Amino acid sequence: MKRFSIGKAQTEKKELSKFQGVWSRTFGEVDMVTVPNFVFVDSVMMIRDNRATITEGGQAFEMEIVRLDTSTNPKHIDIKSLGGSEKDSISFGIYELEGDTLRICHSLKRQAMRPIKFEIPKGSGLVQSLWKRVKK
């Protein structure tokens, strides 16, 4: 049993290393409504270790990636808010990471059910974002 948990932790750490760096949002969808591209002009996410900072419109939002599960399809991600009115709440989501493209789908309603696929039904309270890695 111990051997499995160590292996899983190492797998998560390896997966998290692929998230490191600066990302620029290229697409967003909330409750089946596509967010216009001009909203993302300055939307940047910086991931270092398990901390993510998203900067939009001059405001920064701090988050912690508390868990990745690569054994599921789609892969799972749990994100903890580190500030504001949602401080310490956890959002359950799914993600897809292919090269320099990261897609995340999660609920805006904290502690809500995890989405099972990358679809955003109207009234679901789900948000989906597409991020591209910023090249140095």
Image (tube, rainbow, N blue to C red):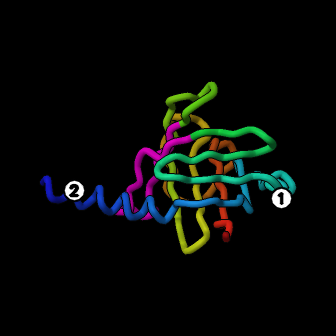
Q: Nearer the viewer, residue 80 or 134?
A: 134
**Label 2 to label 1: alpha-carbon separation:** 42 Å
Instruction: Left or right? Give the position of 87 relative to 3.
Output: right
Residue 3, image x and y in percent? Answer: 15, 58
Instruction: Identify the secondary structure beneath mark 1.
Output: helix
Residue 32 drawn above or below residue 71: above
Residue 111 drawn above or below residue 21: above
Q: Callout 1: 10 Å neighbours few (<14), some, many (20+)? A: few
Identify the residue at image location x=61%, y=69%: 101
Instruction: Left or right? Give the position of 101 relative to 94.
Output: right
Instruction: Decide whether residue 115 is among the magenta residues.
Output: no
Residue furthest top as drawn: 85
Q: Which residue is mark 2?
A: 6
Which marked residue is nearer to the observer: mark 2 or mark 1?
2
Range of residues picked out in magenta: 63-80
Residue furthest bottom as drawn: 99
Identify the residue at image location x=38%, y=56%: 69
Instruction: Decide whether residue 69 is among the magenta residues.
Output: yes
Q: Nearer the viewer, residue 34 or 17?
A: 17
Query: CB atoms at circles 2 and 1 under 8 Å apart?
Result: no
Tally of numbered discs: 2
Inspect the image, locate mark 1, and give the three-letter code of the amino acid beneath it.
Asn
Residue 78, image x and y in percent? Answer: 46, 46
Q: Which residue is mark 1?
A: 37
